[in-house]
Image (spheres, helix red, strand yellow):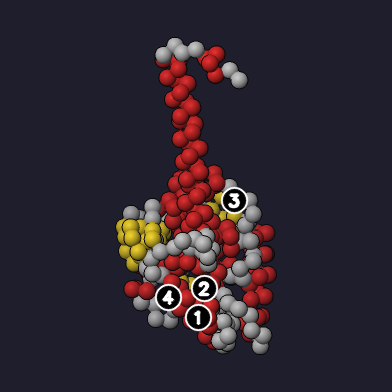
Amino acid sequence: MIILDGNSLTIDEVVRVARRHEPVSLAETARIQVNRASEWVQSISAADTAVYGVNTGFGIFADRRISAAETHQLSRNLILSHAVGTGEPLDDDIVRAAMLIRANTLAKGYSGVRLEVIDTLIAMLNLGVTPVIPSQGSLGSSGDLAPLAHLALVFTTDGKDVDEDSGWAKYQSQKMTGKSAMEQAGIQRLILGPKEGLAVSNGATFSAAIGALAIEDALDLSEIALITLAMSLEALQGVSAAFDA
């Protein structure tokens, strides 16, 4: 069992979840941190003070105030507008690694999301719902916005809840709409709250996932190369003194 606390996730643990489907849970300390930040965001959303990303628009629309009643749609619209990736889908292990890393990042308690967001990502990992994420559409420089938006399409919704706005996912080796995959797995999709659209879509998460798996593969190849060298030297009756320091 991999326990996420926001601070101690290792590359080995990423690999164990991404490729070996080891189960995941959230540490109690993280739950306290997340609840504290979520309560702060909720209070800001209901107040008169403008705070970027909570009750304002984004980018050039930062000066637009958003009412408390409209913050849910603002978060959903941010996801829909950034789900513009293209190309062949990323491998499942990369997607699972990214989901784990995103959950761990949110577990730090700095993003202001509700516990339900993290618990939903963890449930998807544990029950085998893997979003289909296009491989092209992000430079990683200001965050993997497009890939993360495609991920969020699967586990978030709005009042309309139409299939074509739910993205695509794999469940039990079958590709289907995100809505169908979540329904079959018995996981409820979320209506995002204030700031949650920004929190789930802004971060270099897929870049970190690809990097973590690449490091693991490089270490494996290095060890294989050393073993191959040793066995070849032995088979050829080579002179081991040549390798003395």
Q: CA distance from mark 4 to mark 2?
A: 11 Å
Q: Which residue is mark 1?
A: 74
Mark closer to the chain start, 3 or 1: 3
Q: Which residue is mark 3?
A: 9
Label 3, secondary structure: give it.
loop
The tag on residue 152 is: none
**Is 211 placed above or below 223 here?**
below
**Is 18 placed above or below 138 here?**
above
Give, as a three-letter code, the residue at label 4: Ser
Give, as a three-letter code, the residue at label 3: Leu
Q: CA distance from mark 3 to mark 1?
A: 31 Å
Q: CA distance from mark 3 to mark 4?
A: 31 Å
Mark closer to the chain start, 4 or 1: 1
Q: Residues within 10 Å of mark 2 (few under 14, many from 20)?
A: many
**Residue at position x 66%, y 70% from top?**
37
Q: Nearer the viewer, mark 4 or mark 1?
A: 4
Q: Are marks 2 and 3 in contact (CB under 8 Å)?
A: no
Mark closer to the chain start, 3 or 4: 3
**Residue at position x 58%, y 58% from top?**
104
**Residue at position x 64%, y 76% from top?**
41
**Residue at position x 66%, y 88% from top?**
48
Q: CA distance from mark 2 to mark 3?
A: 24 Å
Residue 237: % across, % down = 44, 11
Mark closer to the chain start, 2 or 1: 1
Q: Which residue is mark 2?
A: 197
Q: Are marks 2 and 1 in contact (CB under 8 Å)?
A: yes
| Left or right position of 179 against 49 | left
As rendered, which of 30 and 75 lies closer to the eye?
75
Give, as a three-letter code, the residue at label 1: Leu
Mark closer to the chain start, 2 or 3: 3
Q: Is residue 136 visible?
A: yes
Q: Which residue is mark 4?
A: 81
